[in-house]
Image (cartoon, rainbow, N blue to C red):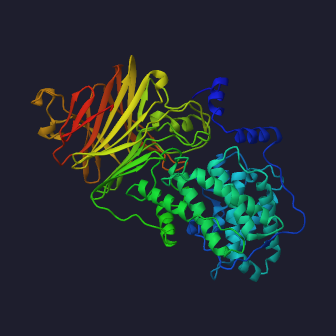
Amino acid sequence: MTEPSLALYWRTVRHLRGSQLGCLVRRRVFGRRTLAKHVGGPAQLRWLPHAPEFPEWNPSWSRDMLETRAWDFLNVPTVVAERVPWSGTEYPKLWYYHLNYCDFLNVDLTRPGDERLLRSAYSLALDWSDRNATGGEIGWEPYTLSLRIVNWLKFLTRNARRLEELGENRALDRILASLRSQALTLERQFEKDLRANHLLKNIKALIFAGALLDSPESSRWLDESRRLLRREIREQVLPDGGHFERSPMYHAQALEDFLDLETLTSACGGTAGCDLGLSGPIERMAAFLEAILHPDGEIPLLNDAALGVARPARELLALSRARGGATIPTRRGVRVTVLGEAGYAVIREAESASCLIFDAGPLGPDHQLGHAHCDVLSYELSLHGQRVVVDTGVSTYERGPERHYERSTAAHNTVRIDAQEQAEIWASFRVGRRPRLGRIEARDIRGCQTMRGRHFGYEHCGVIHCRTVVHAPGNGWFVLDSMSGTGRHRVESFVHFHPAIEVAACTEARDVPPELSHGADGDPSGVEPMRPRWIVQFGEHRYFFMTLGAGELTLSGSWYAPEFGLRQNRAVIHWTWAGDLPTAMLYAFVPADVTPPVVRRLDGDTIEVAGATMRLNS
């Protein structure tokens, strides 16, 4: 891991905005958290003309935790404690954050027989208020405050009437008083140093507080938050609909934030003055999300992304459609989607439920790369509905070797030069030097669909990496890497498989059909053909992993982290080559039951795939 130095600090902070630096200095000097006291009685809950219909958060899971008080987050073994562990050091910090978010209160408890669960729910809110009274606890951090304020207010919009019917007016007043203090405290701690998704959560929470709490500060909260929201939408939602942090997980979270705010706007009926104009951004973000999903209906794990944190993508898209949003029509054949501003491109073959999601864009906004990985020109590949090639994902945000590895170049399906990282990652969320990128190019060449990206992250080594991805007829997928420059270098290419994929070496003649078993002398033109190296098998499907180029290939293992706190063993192909540049490396996934397309290197810079000729560096 990179050790911090003055030069590293400079390469990191030089990209921050002046406003970020000012906020950062103020927080370091004056401290982050000061508990705001309010004058007068508690706020009152504002009853809107139309009850907002917010979707519940995993209701069976929420009800189970309210029933048992057995806390279940992030694949940490279920915690059963005599007292609710709102703070501590026994579990990962992110675990305590999730407990303090109170997602389990985002549930409707008004059905007959729910009284016991309802009492459990409001007693948890009261317990939090009693045991987090200093403002220094983890639950008072701005991000945690933001999520809890929204969840508590969603709880009250559903369940406050029932609390009144049960004679729990005093408890309701205490919860409302706590909410007012929380909103006042959040108002003074907007995360203008971190910005990005953190600031969006702050803004959303204060809009909720302004719209749903009747207190002296409500108008101020709404006015300031609406102004900030419009500015952040312009910056954070790219023209192609992608979220500017380039994390599919945070994209999904931001989309749900906008859907919630639109639901609130509709329920307000204009009485709270919260018309936010979210229709366009929501439709663009929903279309973007639908474009990048795997055939299994979930997000790729690019940059900081894990399953089970954001609402499932299919639910989000259903919510978007339910509001009358546009849908992407089902298309047959093969199509290429380029999302140029975000830096993603997708080749999707409908008939075989296969797709390749290519990450060829920036790590994120230069002033906030906290969730960036060294994954430039990486990709994820699904075949026949099964994830086959996958990035490593994220198991932890805790600083340490695991976090460093999951952000590293070696943890992604891309190329590393001279054992150096594409970007200068350090700590848990910091980036110093970062790569320049070229634009994504997509073309159809004689029935082959191609995507190309280029990055200059190794300019300091004198190397430029260009990658071309090709989909050929017959569902063959080709990855062509070209390294240009001068001098001698070590090039490593990594291919990480999903744990469900079996990878076995082609060691016996019966493994390989005759048309693939010849060597260089078998090609009448004398040009070296691709060679099968491994059999990739899942269910009833078998593919050959084939290569063209020199170097050493080995099969090893690493872990796959589809969720926080979860690591699964999986296979990794590691291809290493050392020599003088320029050089090219080509590998492919070709179905074992079809005649493979002809692939030949015609000269040092030209490749022919299924009759389509392409130059690697043009």
- Report the front residue among 295 and 222: 222
Q: Residue furthest left?
A: 524
Say if 388 sits above or below 36 in the image. Answer: above
Q: Position of residue 93 (x, y in %)?
A: 66, 46
Picture coordinates of residue 397 (x, y %)? Answer: 60, 43
Vertical side of 489 occupied by 332: above or below: below
Left or right: 216, with 356 as reference point:
right
Q: Residue at x 49, y 65 (%)?
A: 315
- How many numbered discs? 0
Q: How far across and how far down the image is residue 77, in percent?
A: 58, 52
Report the front residue among 563 and 88.
Answer: 563
Visible in this render: residue 609?
Answer: yes
Please indicate, yes or no, whether residue 98 appears anywhere in the rendered image.
no
- Residue at far top of view: 487
Of residues 61 and 3, the one drawn nearer to the viewer in this rendering: 3
Rendered-image quadrant of the N terminus: top right
* 193 over 3 or under it: above or below: below
Q: Quadrant of residue 15?
A: top right
> In the orientation shown, which residue stands out farthest toward the right?
40
Residue at image x 55%, y 53%?
Answer: 237
In the picture, measured across the screen, residue 61 lies left or right of residue 413, that is right
**Image side of residue 445 versus residue 451, left or right:** left
**Nearer-the-camera pick, 112 or 283:** 283
Q: Estimate the x, y position of residue 292 in percent, counting from the top left.
A: 43, 53
What quarter of the picture does the C terminus occupy? Answer: top left
Examine the image and state in which quarter residue 443 appears: top left
